[in-house]
Amino acid sequence: MVRNTPTLQHSNTPSPLFSDYHTHPQGHRTQNYSQALLQPWIESARLAGLTDIAFTDHDRYHSGVDFGEIDQLGERNPDVKIRVGIELDNDPESSAAGRKWIEQHWDKLDFVLGSVHFLQRDDQMFDTVPAGASQFEGRNIDEVYVDYFRRVRSIASTGLVDCLAHLDLIKIHGHRPNAEVEAIADETLDFIRARNLAIELSTAGWRKPVDELYPSDRLIKLAMQKGIPFTTASDAHSHVQLGENFDRLAQKMSMLGIREVSVYEKHKRIVKTLKR
Ligand SMILES: [Zn+2]
Ligand SMILES: [Zn+2]
């Protein structure tokens, strides 16, 4: 594996990618939405050449989301489409409240991501770096993968998500199954297609130990065969990460033959063809 690949961020060739559908203005704590919190994200979006972004804070911080503040932000920044979203995960403690909040605000939300951050342990996300790697110790990795994708299907089946986030997050620490990953994930991709959901292409994997796009090229190809649509995403937890490595992502998409990106308005998918 090639490590330390140079970042092509903000290079001279502008990326044709224009949308970032996985962002966390609140980071990892509840911070009430305000113009002061959100405006820097718009400035960074402009710098990165993005014209369509979705705020998708973790559902456990839903109390910080303020629809009025987002409306006001949109009025101040008519050149950037701002979508209201949330990332619903399988947190054994908070996700029941998160689901309820999504149900209550469904008509106001544009976009909901579904994620699996928890395996057997209730008290630690497996994608915590590096501590979460201990959850894999001594375990059969194929079984861990099967269990993970079962949980992805469970989130997909809630009827409360539009798109699955970081589909193969389970590889984050570099653990690989012995079986073909296509065989393990095939049923899940069929499930996603049958429910007309999208998956994201997330550059976040390039800043994690695995140093690989989420999902892998093999899973992207399988998703393409099944006709699953894609969003583009950075999973930014700071506004400076918006659109991170999108030039590199654009190159990969071009190589794989992906020419369409999905955006969402009130859960309605709009497919955009990329400019060359
Ligand atoms: Zn996530
Ligand atoms: Zn996230």
Image (cartoon, rainbow, N blue to C red):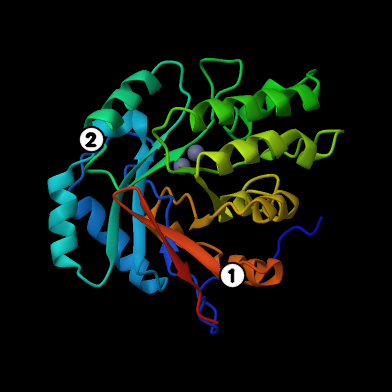
Residue 127 — which label?
none
Choose between 101 and 9: the one closer to the eye: 101
Residue 260 position, x and y percent, is: 53, 67
Compared to residue 117, the image places residue 186 above or below, namely below
Badge 2 amino acid: His
Q: Is mark 1 within 8 Å of ligand 2?
A: no
Residue 250 — which label?
1
Quadrant position of residue 174: top right
Residue at the image point whose x is 53% and y is 25% from the top = 154
Residue at the image point whose x is 30% and y is 67% from the top = 43
Choose between 46 and 54: the one closer to the eye: 54
Looking at the rendered image, the disc whose residue lies closer to the viewer, 2 or 1, is: 2
Q: Secondary structure at mark 1?
A: helix
Residue 229 position, x and y percent, is: 54, 55
Residue 69 position, x and y percent, is: 15, 49
Badge 1 amino acid: Ala
Which quarter of the rendered picture does the N terminus lie within? bottom right
Looking at the image, which residue sits at the far bottom? 12
Residue 135 position, x and y percent, is: 67, 21
Which quarter of the rendered picture does the C terminus lie within? bottom right
Asked if residue 51 lies left or right of residue 244, the reply is: left
Residue 169 showing in the rendered view:
no
Residue 148 showing in the rendered view:
yes
Residue labelled with disc 2: 105
Asked if residue 145 lies left or right of residue 102, the reply is: right
